[in-house]
Amino acid sequence: MSHDCSIVEDLLPLYHKHSLQNDTLLFIEQHIASCESCQRLASTQPSPSQNKPLKRTLTFFHLVFIVLSFMFALNSSLLGNNLLFIVSYAIFGCLTYLFYKNSWIVFAISFTPVFFWAIIDNLNNSLYISHSNLSEIGALLIGASFIAILHTIFALLGSAIAIILRKLFN
């Protein structure tokens, strides 16, 4: 096994994921074309579809962020300290974006728990549900959506700040 073979072996996972620069890609393809052992190694390496992308793996830190989002949903209220509420959700949105690098995840994490919290919190509220008819359930869903959208707007503002910060520092 030559020195080039060990380099190619180390780079094969990135080669299969198409994550190499053109010069490195050309080097690997030329070497594989001339080396039988690296050809066998390249053909036995799992394809990118067999590898789980890092973003799809559930880690401890993902669970921490999800739990934090539920805590924000349960402990924050627009009727309380408005400035603290806005700042905390903006910081939460900023950190979530920096962690996941995806605004849709920020949206889902900030909207979903608040939406369900608002529904559960108002199920016993006679303003929404007194006879359990369709119009009252619709009002409950609209109210829960409105509260969740307000929370999400502040989280997405934090996400926008994170996007700007990433562009400034890259």
Image (cartoon, grey):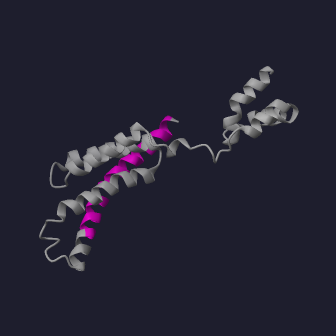
The reply to whether residue 153 is in sight is no
x, y percent for residue 81: 16, 48
Residue 64 vs residue 25, the one in the foreground = 64
Q: Quadrant of residue 139?
A: bottom left
x, y percent for residue 52: 57, 44
Question: Relative to 117, does residue 97 appear above or below in the rendering?
Answer: above
Q: Which residue is located at x 22 percent, y 50 percent?
A: 74
Horizontally, residue 123 falls left or right of residue 149, namely: left
Residue 65 vs residue 149, the one in the foreground = 65
- Quadrant of the rendering where the N terminus is positioned: top right
Question: Relative to 110, does residue 169 appear above or below in the rendering?
Answer: above
x, y percent for residue 141: 27, 69
Let me know if residue 32 is in the magenta part: no
Horizontally, residue 25 falls left or right of residue 94, namely: right
x, y percent for residue 14: 67, 37
Residue 79 vs residue 13, the one in the foreground = 13
Q: Which residue is located at x 17 percent, y 71 percent?
A: 128
Let me know if residue 144 is in the magenta part: yes
Counting the numbered discs, the total is 0
Q: Which residue is located at x 39 percent, y 43 percent?
A: 96
Q: Quadrant of residue 142?
A: bottom left
The reply to whether residue 42 is in sight is yes
Tell me the magenta residue range. Answer: 141-169
Residue furthest to the left: 126
Main secondary structure of the magenta stretch: helix
